[in-house]
Every structure is written in C-alpha cells, then in structure tokens.
Amino acid sequence: MTQNSKPVLRFAPSPTGFLHIGGARTALFNWLYAKHTGGTFLLRIEDTDRERSTPEAVDAILKGMAWLGLNWDGQTVYQFARAGRHRAIAEQLLAEGKAYRCYATPEELDEMRAKQRAEGKPTRYDGRWRDRDPASAPPGAPFVIRLRSTDEGETVVHDKVMGDVRFANDQLDDMILLRSDGTPTYMLAVVVDDHDMGVTHVIRGADHLNNAARQLQIIHALGWPVPVYAHVPLIHGPDGAKLSKRHGALAVEAYRDMGYLPETMRNYLLRLGWSHGDDEIISTEQAIAWFNLENIGRSPARFDFKKLDNLNGHYLRTMDDAALTETLAQHLTHASPPIVLNSKVRARITAAMPGLKERAKTLIELAQSAGYLYTDGPRTLDDAAAKVLSPEARAALGAMLQALEQTDWSAPALEAATRNFAEGRGIKLGQAAQPLRAALTGHTTSPPVFGVLETLGREESINRIRAYAE
RNA sequence: GCUCCCAUCGUCUAGCGGUUAGGACGCGGCCCUCUCAAGGCUGAAACACGAGUUCGAUUCUCGUUGGGAGCGCCA
C-alpha cells in the first residue's frame, strides 16, 4: 500500500489480440472500483512475449478502451521496457538462495511431461536441478532461473469473490522466473510490476485464480505486501462455450460497428456478473456510486444479444436528439460504403428523431429507418410497400393529394385532413395512412406518418406522393 | 490424468435458515394504435441430484452429476 492508502487498480492486457468482451468487463470493473473509491486506475500492456505481441493489438486495445470511455491515470506502462528490473529481482532471489538455475532443455522437459502424463501423474517440473550442483552443468549451457518454492504447507488466496482458496504447496512446482534468454516470465513480471506500481487491488479473470497462488509464492519470497484479489468468473458465449479469442469472441469495436452505444456496453457488462438488487438500468454515474467487490457473482455468465438489444434500445430512446443524430452520422462514416450526411439531412433527421429512436435497437436499425430522409425524390418501394400501393390505393392517393394540398402543413392539421378524407370515403384511417407511408418512405413501417409528412415538408411530400398517385 | 472454481426460470440475476422463491430479457395473451415500436396489464417458466446438520433447508456440510479454468522458457 502506498502512503495515501487510496486503492490502486490496473488493467493488464497482453497485446496478442484485440480487446474482447471479457477483457472489457475486467477493465470496466477495475475502472469502476477506482472511480468508486477515489483511487487510481492504471493501464499496463503485458508485452513480454515478443513473438506474439503486436503494435496493432496495442492500438486495438487502446481504441477499445477509449470507445468504452474507460480512461486511465498516468502513462501507459509497457512491461517489456521494465525487463531489466525484472531480471534484477530474479538475480536477487538467486543470490538469496530463493531461486536456482535450471539447465534442463525444453525438449527434456517435454519428455518429462509426456512421461508423467503417460503414467497418469500430474505434469509438474520435478525439481531435477533444485539441489544439483550448478558446476555439473555443461559449461556455457543456457539456463533458466526457477523459484525455490516450499513443498510444505499451503498457499491461501484470500479472494474477495471466490473466498479463501487453498492450494497445497506440493502441488505447485518451481516455476520459471527468468527465461534462458534473460527475459522475465509473466509470473515474475506481474508481481514485480504490481509491486512497483503500488497496485493494491487485483481484479482479473478467474482464469488467473491458479496463478494467484504461484504469484503469492513469489511475493512471499520477496517479502512484499499482498494485494487484495478479486477473480471474476469468465463470460461464455450464447452456446455456453468458452468465449475467447480462439472461439469467436468479438472485439469491442465489433460491438461499435453493430450499432451499440458505449453506455449500453457499460451497463450490460456491469450486470453480467455484478448486481445491485433488482436494478437493471444503471447509468455510469450510478454504477460508480454503487460498485463494490461484494456483489460480484461467483458463477460464469453467458452473453445474450437479446438483452443487449433491449438495453441499447433504452439508451437510444433516452438520448438527446441532436446528439444521437451526430452519433448516427459518425456511425455512417464507418459503414461500407461510408455515407456522409449534409446539414439539411441532419436537420431533418434530428427533427424526425423522436419518432425514429423509439423504434430502433441499434444504430444500424436507426440508419435503415432514417433512410427515407437521406435523399429527395420518389421512393423505390420494397415488396410490402409495393403490395400496399394497389390500384385502388393509388387512386385514393390521388384523391388525398388534392385534400392535402390545401392543408396547413403541420402534423395535427394533416392528420385531421386525412381522417376527414377517410371518413368521407368510408374507409379506415389505416387504409389511407398505409398508402401514404408507402409512397413517402418506400416501406410499410415508419414513425407516425403525419410526422413524416411534416418533417419532409409540403413540396417534398407532394412530390413523393404524386409519383404513386393515380 | 492432476489442481482449482462454479451450479435459482431458456438467458442475466435477487435471495444471505422460515418468502405465494422477486426482478429483467425473451416468449404467449390483452389494452393502446395510421404501420412498426414504445408503454401499461397479464400468463407460462427455476432452486441439478443424493445424503446429512436443523423444529425447519434454495440458503450450512459432504458426496454425485454436469459445466468451466489452469497444469508452457504464453500472458
């Protein structure tokens, strides 16, 4: 703990792929807890695997975090840059006799594990160099540094989510601290970096629970303070299978492209594994005020797009019209081919937005339903609309056109005129409204048709109707 | 195979020894209605199984079954 005693959180992704939904939730929980406690939230890129780390992945992670609105404090820490420090710690442990050199080759170890597996034994390093005289090693041969861990007793992870998790020490083998090329392993690097960064709380995926015990052994060997651990259950796909980059997990940017709002993602991800009584709609502000470690659930969750859609619909509906128009315009620039909206069209969309946003679950749906506002002129009809515009309907449209032309161009007046028209003809309002909608939008569903007439304006509306009126 | 974790409606979850087991999504019905939504009302839907502990278990303990994670000179 640092002297200010405020919690220090961190998110530590490895840049070997994009930021997927599980990582995003881990980041969110860390961020939320830091905000809630007034602590700090750090970002560390775990790029010690030089083979698989890529700048593209780093970029994708940073972009994903930015889109989700998860800002971090201070500079991004790149773990590989700290390799010298990691090595120094490994050598310190070696000097203190808490670690030792192991000259076993990878091939030799593969063989050892294959044999153990064949014999039905647990696959663990057998400690073949633990008490061997280093002088017996072939001169100049490469070696790794392993932790000399105790076999007696147990290591207990006091986890805020899982409770006390016990590991018998004889189950834990002597893990590698420093590779033969002198670079640190993940186990060493996390421990050293978390310590050096003053990390007090480690919130991460439950796939690290086993690792926690190993890391604890290093921490104990170093005599460092133990952080608070909270291992969050993993997220599974809709089919119950593991959701990972190997099994079709999506990058957070894919959710952006599917038309979901960052606010929706924060709310949805929060509820996937954390609860506050019966509350479902939880704003980010409210989440910061409420978030804690105690209410994180212990069982894995499945990702459900239906519920995501519903939540997104809610946030779409409650969004400011002008702001949503802007968001939609942004979204359209990501479309292929990109669509650019001019100011006239934007004004129209904003005017129609109250009716539009009520009907959309995603920005993609919103973009489609607003399609009748993008361009001027008669519409091309979809199948259903073409069916609606029967000869009789077209005739009715022609008669209606005359009534409409002399009407004051406001939704209430247009509705009154149309109702009047329908009544005079002895038809239902729908029989007048549907042909109108079809001619105006090219579809059979849209926001209330009299509002459509109003936002389109007299000239444009009449032009569109005339195209299908007899 | 070994270690560890998990287990309430289809899904996300509330529950923290005594409840008509609650909410949300989805699904069915009704209302509203110019379409589609939204909204309101309403219906169906769950404590994996077996032993204990207890006056009493969804809740505590153990086991079974079923999921999941880890067991690398990856992170």
Image (cartoon, coloured by chain):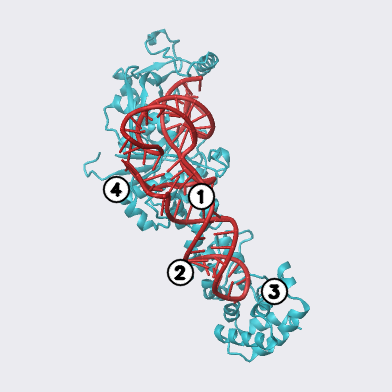
Which mark is first along the chain, 3 or 1? 1
Give the residue drawn at x 30%, y 39%: A200
Which mark is first along the chain, 4 or 2? 4
Left or right of A410 on screen, residue A147: left
Against A67, residue A470 (above or below) is below
**Of tags 1 and 2, which is closer to the observer?**
2
Using the image, tell me which numbered label, if any, was put on residue A308: none
Left or right of A25 on screen, residue A448: right
Residue beneath disc 4: A39
| The C terminus of chain A, quarter of image | bottom right
Using the image, tell me which numbered label, if any, was put on residue A252: 1
Against A304, residue B30 (above or below) is below
Task: Determine whether the residue tagged by mark 1 lies in a helix, strand or loop.
Answer: helix
Disc 2, disc 4: CB below 8 Å?
no
The chain in red: B
Q: How far, Cα to Cα, is label 2 from label 4?
A: 32 Å
| The N terminus of chain A, quarter of image | top left
Query: Measured from the top left, where is residue A430 in percent x and y?
Result: 65, 77
- The part of the image, by quadrant, that contains residue A206 is top left
Query: Measured from the top left, where is residue A383 in percent x and y?
Result: 73, 67
Which mark is first along the chain, 3 or 4? 4
Local crowd at mark 2 within 10 Å, few (<14), some, or many (≥20)?
A: some
Left or right of A458 on screen, residue A133: left
> Looking at the picture, which amino acid does disc 3 mark?
Arg
Q: How far, Cα to Cα, is label 1 from label 2?
A: 24 Å
Residue beneath disc 2: A320
Disc 4, disc 1: CB below 8 Å?
no
Against A185, residue A21 (above or below) is below
**Are the residues under marks 1 and 3 on the same chain?**
yes
Residue beneath disc 3: A379
Task: Determine whether the residue tagged by mark 2 lies in a helix, strand or loop.
Answer: loop
